[in-house]
Image (cartoon, grey):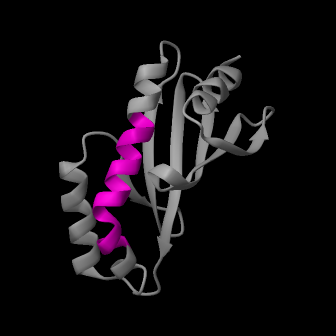
């Protein structure tokens, strides 16, 4: 089962499993060392979806949206996205799950952590809007 494989990878990385729902294919991970809090993993064959809430905003802000889109251009994997209501900024990353190995999973988690650490001052500033 894919969820067991993903959970095994997460545990190898010393991620804490905060929540698991096998029926819905959901895991929620925590890895404070990498700055990852409540990273939602959705197992939806043929893909694995990684999604993490970053902040909410009250008003549209062209400067913020422009900066996030420019950062997306620099981001090798994943992207900043809005939720369906357009009120929250999330980070989302999708990967093929069938041939996913530990190295690829580890690289994805590390990439998310690096991006969040690198962009943290901006995220903090934008969360004030």
Residue at 65%, 24% (x, y): give it: 8
**Image x and y of residue 112, in percent:** 40, 47
Please name whichever residue, 7 or 33, is drawn nearer the observer in this view of the structure: 33
**Image x and y of residue 104, in percent:** 41, 24
Residue at 47%, 56% (x, y): give it: 35
**Image x and y of residue 118, in percent:** 28, 59
Please, is residue 129 above or below residue 3 in the view? below
Q: Tell me if residue 113 is in the magenta stretch.
A: yes
Residue at 44%, 30% (x, y): give it: 106
Q: Tell me if residue 128 is in the magenta stretch.
A: no
Residue at 37%, 57% (x, y): give it: 116
Please, is residue 121 above or below residue 25 in the view? below
Q: Is residue 55 left or right of residue 14?
A: left
Q: In terms of image quadrants, where is residue 5?
A: top right
Q: Main secondary structure of the magenta part?
A: helix
Q: Which residues are magenta?
A: 108-123
Q: Is residue 65 left or right of residue 103?
A: left
Q: Is residue 75 left or right of residue 103?
A: left
Please, is residue 54 above or below residue 3 in the view? below
């Amino acid at each position: 089962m894919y969820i067991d494989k993903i959970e095994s990878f997460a545990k190898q990385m010393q991620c804490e499993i905060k929540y698991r729902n096998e029926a819905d294919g959901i895991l929620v991970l925590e890895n404070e060392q990498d700055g990852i809090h409540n990273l939602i993993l959705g197992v939806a064959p043929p893909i694995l979806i990684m999604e993490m809430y970053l902040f909410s905003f009250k008003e549209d802000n062209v400067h913020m949206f422009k900066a996030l889109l420019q950062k997306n251009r620099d981001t090798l994997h994943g992207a900043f996205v809005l939720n369906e209501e357009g009120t929250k900024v999330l980070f989302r990353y999708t990967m093929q799950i069938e041939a996913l190995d530990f190295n690829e999973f580890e690289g994805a988690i590390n990439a998310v952590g690096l991006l969040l650490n690198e962009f943290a001052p901006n995220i903090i500033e934008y969360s004030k809007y």
